[in-house]
């Protein structure tokens, strides 16, 4: 037995991850439910490094050095359980199973607990960066025991993406499901980023009157500034692409119904349970589902809306600058919300997650990689107990500078009837947090009126109830 690592599940992500390990000098045992795929990999990419093709689970396990490191790259849910059931009986105490899929962190917690009883380390690991990242360097978010990270860390550091300062985009996020939890929130932020970019695009198109090709150029310019990020970069590529069949902009021939596989929705579901307001991420998930309601949209097409007034050239250019401000400010808010959720999850499950380290490993390899994450890292490194990203001085100042334009953009959106739920939710979150008083006081009064649910007072400790149906005197509750 001579392989330092094994990968089972050789669809594109698994295959590329196995190649990445091999290219970095590790001997990799490879296995797939149907052996044809295993042999195809070795045939096609065998020259890249040392692979050991295993046809059966037994052969696969036998090929691994002890303690064994076994990466499973299969679909989340039942397929993952099935593979664990197949391999766990063949393993020994000290061995490690690394689940690199997009598993729900609650499943990861359960699996970790069950395998821990057998002395096996289960390492739920978020891996981001798509096919390309898996091959050339993903951002890696491992959970599981500290002990397992001592063994796995050096290998993961080798195959991971490197940030601009050379540091590897991997860290031990925390125990049991912490890695998959952080990957889930990463995807929630990914949804929000994509929605905000979509809103910026639609405003530039519908309000400023730019063509997709012109908007691609605007995004290219933005990508040289503080919005520098992978998603902005690929947005320019997608917008400048022309459909070969029709000669039209590609974006105009794609059906405008967004799909989703579930991680963004989980981010919102869990946030609801934890009581964390992730309104921007929630709007992004809802925007995708709204887009998919074709019949409802068709039935609503005749509803009245405002008539858009075309903009002149210089007005459009000034508007584009404002949209950049709105996009940047809204982006700060969605990261604020995402990091709040990670902090709350960490607190709830006792994970002790280092938020600065999370920002650090998202700087390279992953879908939301962005220059901006270096500043989030700096903010948390300077103050690990930062109550919110918005309370960081730099981000606070940037939002202060952006807010006039941010508001103007929303006014233009409302006036022209362009839906901007992401921008609007972000601004509402910002305004609510900084408000002196919120109508929550009224909500408490209403609750006390109809249900005697009680309220607290600003001037005295305790809980109170007003006798609404009687003489309206106040009693201590
Ligand atoms: C990543 C991506 C990846 C996947 C998304 C897509 O980090 O590499 O997030 O995990 O592409 O989950 O999700 P939807 O299909 O839900 O858009």
Image: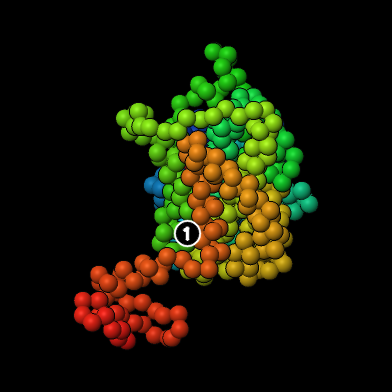
Can you identify the residue that label 1 sits on? Answer: 277
Label 1 neighbourhood size at 10 Å, few (<14), some (14-19), many (20+)? some
Q: Secondary structure at mark 1?
A: loop
Looking at this rendering, what residue extends furthest in the right direction? 165
Task: Name the one closer to the observer, 131 or 250.
Answer: 250
Answer whether residue 10 is visible to the viewer in this image: no
114 vs 365: above or below = below
At horizontal 45% and vertical 83% (from top left) the residue drawn is 459
Residue 205, image quadrant: top right
Task: Name the one closer to the observer, 462 or 359.
Answer: 462
Residue 394, image quadrant: bottom right
Q: State the image coordinates of residue 56 (x, y, percent, origin top left).
A: 48, 41
Position of residue 402 in the picture relative to residue 449 (left or right): right
At horizontal 66% and vertical 60% (from top left) the residue drawn is 396
Q: State the image coordinates of residue 117 (x, y, percent, origin top left).
A: 45, 66
Task: Name the one closer to the observer, 54 or 121.
Answer: 121
Looking at this rendering, what residue extends furthest in the left direction? 470
At horizontal 68% and vertical 40% (from top left) the residue drawn is 321
Answer whether residue 311 is visible to the viewer in this image: yes
At horizontal 63% and vertical 58% (from top left) the residue drawn is 358
Q: How is the image coloured?
A: rainbow
Position of residue 464 in the picture relative to residue 329 (left or right): left
The quarter of the image holding the C terminus is bottom left
Task: Name the one closer to the observer, 287 or 12.
Answer: 287
Marks counted in the figure total 1
Q: State the image coordinates of residue 266 (x, y, percent, origin top left).
A: 44, 51
Q: State the image coordinates of residue 191 (x, y, percent, origin top left).
A: 52, 44
411 vs 440: above or below = above
């Amino acid at each position: 037995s001579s392989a330092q690592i094994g990968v089972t599940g050789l669809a594109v992500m698994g295959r590329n991850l196995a190649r990445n390990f091999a290219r970095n000098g590790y001997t990799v045992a490879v296995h797939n439910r149907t052996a044809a795929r295993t042999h195809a990999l070795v045939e096609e990419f065998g020259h890249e490094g040392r692979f050991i093709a295993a046809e059966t689970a037994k052969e696969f396990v036998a090929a691994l050095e002890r303690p064994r490191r076994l990466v499973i790259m299969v679909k989340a849910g039942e397929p993952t359980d099935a593979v664990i059931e197949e391999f766990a009986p063949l393993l020994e105490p000290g061995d490690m199973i690394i689940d690199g899929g997009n598993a729900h962190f609650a499943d990861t917690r359960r699996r970790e607990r069950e395998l821990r009883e057998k002395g096996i380390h289960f390492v739920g690991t978020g891996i981001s960066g798509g096919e390309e990242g898996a091959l050339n360097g993903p951002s890696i978010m491992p959970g599981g025991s500290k002990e397992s990270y001592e063994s796995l860390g050096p290998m993961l550091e080798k195959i991971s993406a490197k940030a601009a300062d050379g540091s590897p985009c991997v860290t031990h996020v925390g125990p049991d499901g912490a890695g998959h939890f952080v990957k889930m929130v990463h995807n929630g932020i990914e949804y929000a980023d994509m929605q905000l970019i979509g809103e910026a695009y639609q405003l530039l198109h519908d309000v400023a009157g730019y063509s997709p090709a012109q908007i691609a150029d605007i995004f290219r310019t933005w990508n040289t500034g503080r919005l520098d990020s992978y998603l902005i970069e690929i947005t320019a590529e997608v917008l400048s692409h022309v459909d070969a069949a029709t000669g039209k902009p590609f974006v105009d021939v794609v059906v405008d119904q967004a799909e989703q596989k579930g991680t963004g929705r989980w981010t919102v579901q869990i946030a609801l349970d934890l009581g964390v307001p992730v309104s921007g991420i929630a709007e992004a998930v809802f925007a995708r589902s709204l887009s998919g309601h074709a019949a409802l949209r068709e039935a609503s097409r005749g509803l009245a809306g405002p008539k858009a007034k075309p903009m002149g050239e210089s007005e459009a250019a000034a508007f584009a600058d404002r949209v950049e401000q709105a996009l940047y400010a809204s982006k700060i808010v969605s990261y604020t919300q995402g990091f709040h959720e990670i902090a709350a999850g960490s607190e709830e499950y006792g994970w002790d997650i280092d938020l600065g380290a999370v920002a650090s490993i998202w700087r390279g390899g992953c879908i939301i990689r962005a220059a901006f994450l270096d500043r989030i890292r700096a903010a948390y490194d300077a103050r690990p107990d930062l109550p919110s990203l918005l309370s960081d001085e730099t981000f606070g100042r940037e939002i202060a500078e952006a807010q006039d334009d941010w508001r103007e953009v929303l006014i233009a959106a409302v006036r022209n009837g362009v839906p901007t739920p992401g921008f609007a939710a972000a601004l509402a979150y910002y305004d609510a947090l900084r408000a002196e008083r919120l109508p929550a006081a009224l909500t408490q009064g209403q609750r006390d009126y109809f249900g005697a649910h009680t309220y607290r007072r600003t001037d005295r400790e305790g809980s109170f109830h007003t006798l609404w149906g009687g003489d309206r005197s106040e009693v201590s509750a």
